[in-house]
Amino acid sequence: MPDNLPPDAALAVTDLSFAIDGIRLIHPMGFKVRRGRRLVVLGPNGAGKSLLLRLCHGLLRPDTGQIHRNDHHPAGRRAHAMVFQTPVMLRRSVFDNVTHALAAIGVPVAQLKSRAVEALNRFGLIGLADRPARWLSGGEQQRLAIARAWALRPELLFLDEPSAALDPSATRSIEAMLGDLHAEGVTLMMSTHDLSQARRLADDVLFLASGSLVEAGEAQRFFNDPQTAQARAFIAGDLVW
Ligand SMILES: Nc1ncnc2c1ncn2[C@@H]1O[C@H](COP(=O)(O)OP(=O)(O)OP(=O)(O)O)[C@@H](O)[C@H]1O
Ligand SMILES: [Mg+2]
């Protein structure tokens, strides 16, 4: 574990900010993601949710601040993985999308097949294993993206709007999967602008608006007793920009 990561945290962020072309898109913020919890990043379109997740996963370099997380990837595992708002599928079969991700992290060839079968079974995709991944429906692709990330056995999983644009039954099935991952002890940090989903899933909430962290805390407290006018307006369904 990194020295500066508190023992109860899977991620700790201090003084984080980010700019593009001199425009500050993430204003200085700090927070922790508690180990084994489901942290939901809430906020209207353009609030900075996707940028924050990319920063936390290490895909973007912050301008200021530190992101402390476990970056020790044991053989055949990733400490952290990410599922994107729009699934990124390789021009290969469903099965090969998983084996390719596993091979990329050094899983031995002899284990690739069994690990991919395990992941596809786990997420109800084994029947589609030979199909080109890009032929799958949006909901199926999102499920494959989660299966592929799960196959990496991460302890911390970032998910950016994992059920945006899915129908209610696909959304339910994704939520059930996230519930199972949580029960297995995986720490989840996910964004959504779907308030009812956040109420169903969140243990903790980060509420962003215009690139600033406006409120952070336990979900029940956030929904029952929001502390800021912006959060109250958001919860009431009045969009804040
Ligand atoms: N590469 C970029 N160059 C310039 N501005 C950007 C870039 N990426 C994001 N932004 C801006 O940063 C802000 C935050 O974007 P972000 O994608 O994080 O929002 P979001 O909260 O995820 O929104 P949504 O709910 O629509 O997914 C937006 O105003 C966006 O226009
Ligand atoms: Mg986004």
Image (cartoon, rainbow, N blue to C red):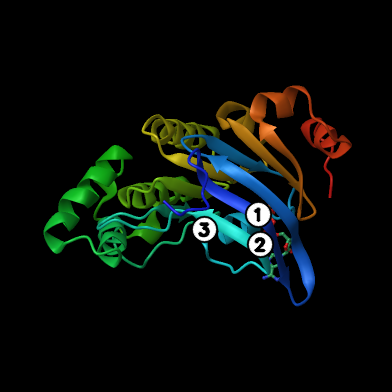
**Is residue 241 positioned above or below 231 on the image?**
below
Residue neighbourhood size for the residue with mark 2, other residues' Cα within 10 Å, grouped as few (<14), some (14–19), many (≥20)? some
Q: Nearer the viewer, residue 132 or 5?
A: 5
Q: Secondary structure at mark 2?
A: strand
Mark 2 — residue? 65
Residue neighbourhood size for the residue with mark 1, other residues' Cα within 10 Å, grouped as few (<14), some (14–19), many (≥20)? some
Q: Secondary structure at mark 3?
A: helix
C-beta proximity under 8 Å, tags 2 and 1: yes
Q: Position of residue 51 (x, y in %)?
A: 64, 59
Mark 3 — residue? 57
Tell me if residue 181 can be seen: yes
Distance (Cα) linking label 2 and label 1: 5 Å
Mark 1 — residue? 14
**Is residue 27 positioned above or below 177 on the image?**
below
Q: Position of residue 76 (x, y in %)?
A: 25, 57
Amino acid residing under circle 3: His
Distance (Cα) linking label 1 and label 3: 15 Å
The answer to which image quadrant residue 97 occupies is: bottom left
Amino acid residing under circle 1: Thr
Nearest to viewer (mark 1 / mark 3):
1
Amino acid residing under circle 2: Gly
Q: Residue at x 21, y 47 (%)?
A: 117
Q: Nearer the viewer, residue 237 or 28?
A: 28
Q: Position of residue 203 (x, y in %)?
A: 58, 30
Quarter containing ligand 1? bottom right
The answer to which image quadrant residue 89 occupies is: bottom left
The answer to which image quadrant residue 77 occupies is: bottom left
